[in-house]
Image: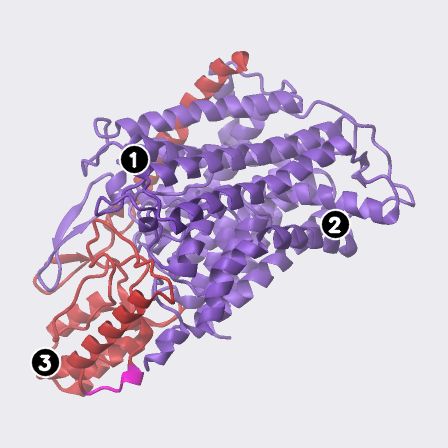
Chain colours: A purple, B red
Amino acid sequence: MNPQILGVVVMFVATLLLAVPLGKYIAKVYSGGRTWTDVIFNPIEKLFYKVSRIDPVREMNWKQSLVALLTLNLIWFLWAMFCLLNQSWLPMNPDHNPNMTPDLAFNTAVSFLVNCNLQDYSGETGLSYFSQVFGLMFLQFASAGTGMAAAAVVFNALKDRTTDKLGNFYDFFLKSCTRILLPICILIATIHLFEGTPMTFKGIDNVMSVQGDTMHVSRGPVAAFVAIKHLGTNGGGFFGANSAHPFENPNYLSNIVQMVAQILIPFAMVFAFGFYCNKRRLAWVFWGVMTVGFLILVIPAIQAEVHGNPYIAKMGISQPGGNMEGKEVRFGATASAFWSIATTVISTGSVNGMHDSFMPVSGMNMLLGMMINSFYGGVGVGFLNFFIYVILAVFIGGLMVGRTPEFLGKKIEAKEMKIAMIIALFHPFLILAFTAIASYFTAHDTNMGWWFADAAGKHNASGWLNNPSYDGFSEMLYQYTSCSANNGSGFEGLADNNPFWNITAGIVLLFSRFLPIIGPVAIAGLLASKKFIPAGSGTLKTDTGTFGLLVFAVKVIIAALAFFPALALGPIAEWMKMH
Amino acid sequence: MKKEIIPSLILTILCILFFSGVYPVVMWGIAQAAPNKGEGFTIKDSNGKYYYENIGQKFSDDKYFWSRPSAVNYNAAGSGGSNKGPDNPDYLAQVQATIDTFMKHNPDINKADIPSDMVTASGSGLDPHISVEGAEVQVARVAKARGLDKNKVEALVKAHIEGPVMGMGPDRINVLKLNIDLDNLK
């Protein structure tokens, strides 16, 4: 087999083989069963609960869980703002990087809080090591733990029983961080240390190049950061170039480890649901739907990148490596194309190549991955997004067979449907409304005043695009899609470090994180308190291929109706121009 | 919400100490056992000068194998790509100009032998590698500039090909390592 194709097949299969046992382990952690990690973490967690006066066995209902979630998040946001606005005098700043501007700090704090990790700065020059480690890396753990804990609440609500007691949110959160994220992070970071990723608190090193030029080489505590960055589907890079940077991702092996790390928990959460609720067949149906969607997006992208850029072919040179603009030789076009789709269907948003320079087909598929946002999806929240589509599919399926829609023995009624519809439609609404506003300013070349100035000090709105016409439109569409999907990758040609983009993106981020958590948790909480009806002969079976197809169709129809016009103006138009 | 604030606040402080304090220190401890104590892999030339083996360098002299074009000019205090779209006319003109420069410095080659990685910028701007084709197309120029036998340079290139890792990934050549060994070639 072609060694590059073999590479991506190995990444996928290895992830699956690891995800099933990990899912079993996660289910055990959430149900309070005994695990091998008890020895280390029982005393630590006990201490944490004692000092913070939390009773980990106090059961909460869905509203109390959400209150705890939002309180924690508010405190974390304030902490991150404090770090970013004061980093110049705080310790661990060997390169003397300045404080962030308030709009950039707002964008960065929100973006790491919501697991998006959009980065309008470059790590080398924009952050101190204190901000990286104590501000952002902490949020990478905490936001991932939040998503997983919310999913755990939903799992708990979907068991075959009637209750309003859905476990203790703090306990779900802390255990997600200590028993699931931390041990795997230590493993991943250790592998990286021996592959060439730095883990030092020393600043820039000045060395002479072979030719005699002076070079400044940025370093930092990268290995610890890069592990949670991927495992928690955060995606925010230590360096500006993210996982394309040769320190952050030194070779093909580290690339495989990072790829597996980022899809691992999104896979495992689906299986964890199966083990936790004893619905293993249904979990495989869910995973199957997600995988079909992923493959439909990833195969054309690999093809397009390996084939290369037709305009460059016309110049008479060869493209043995495919479209190499914005890509690294050590990964090659195949692994970079695979990464670009994997990172967008789950909500990581880390990159090992620059998405703006990918071919239009790949760009469109990245956008679709984020628009649908639940072909696997981010840690915890991917499952929650998928759950919304399941509710919609159950409702439509129920109408088709002419029975009251039921899911796992609970009736789906008007209230649940309303919430599901609002969540499903809010995502396209945020993306399209904000893209429309930005496009309006661009098309009219509006003078943006305080809100925007380009490098030359001009305030014209068109100055924020690095590429003209369709690709320029795609840059704006991509930015808001990435925000609304809490993804964090970008068509980085967009000049996004200015009040207009920092603030509008920050607003989209906040809405698109918390509503899609509140909605599914509320639905699950409402369902949990309903009477449990055992499955009868007329019940719509959900653990079948037919139901999988129905879920898939619902996703495709919603995405196609909502997003096709926007895609037609961006990547589709660009593709037509090139062929 | 009120009664959740104090427990949440204390839990947050403990978590910050644990995940941002203990975890990085543990990793830093493990790093002391890693090559170069986790400060980035280095490599020395025959004069004892050290370089970062994973950070690409700018080579523009005819007697060295060139690296790929870089959007940050190989200044490793930052990193990044060109972010140019594949059909951007400015970008395509820039690629054409890079091809023309390349042809001027390598007059003996066929244009069709230039691989695209030699005329396109990498994602990090610090790519330490070029493709095997990218090295081979420069052999004639380097040999001529140094007055070396072409076969000898060719053999050096062959010796520097790094193949797939456990059967996976592309062939590539680390330009820095190649050029250091080139300087040692008599």
Left or right for A124, reference B104:
right
Say whether residue A7 is visible. no
Q: Is residue B112 magenta?
A: yes
- Which residue is the site of mark 2? A281
Q: Residue furthest right?
A: A537
Residue A375 percent across, percent down from the top left: 60, 51
- Which residue is the site of mark 1? A450
Could you tell me how far apart the alpha carbons at marks 1 and 2 are, in whole angstroms?
A: 56 Å
Are the two marked residues, 2 and 3, in contact with CB atoms closer than 8 angstroms?
A: no
**Label 3 Cα crowd, 10 Å radius (few <14 / some 14-19 / many 20+):** few
B186 relative to A15, above or below:
below
The local secondary structure at tag 2 comes to: helix
Image quadrant containing the N terminus of chain B: top right
Q: Residue placed at 16% from the left, 47% from the top?
A: A205
Q: What span is colored magenta in the figure?
A: B108-113
Chain for disc number 2: A
Could you tell me how far apart the alpha carbons at marks 2 and 3 are, in whole angstroms?
A: 67 Å
Are the two marked residues, 1 and 2, in contact with CB atoms closer than 8 angstroms?
A: no
Q: Residue furthest front?
A: A444
Residue A506 percent across, percent down from the top left: 43, 35
B137 relative to A75, above or below:
below
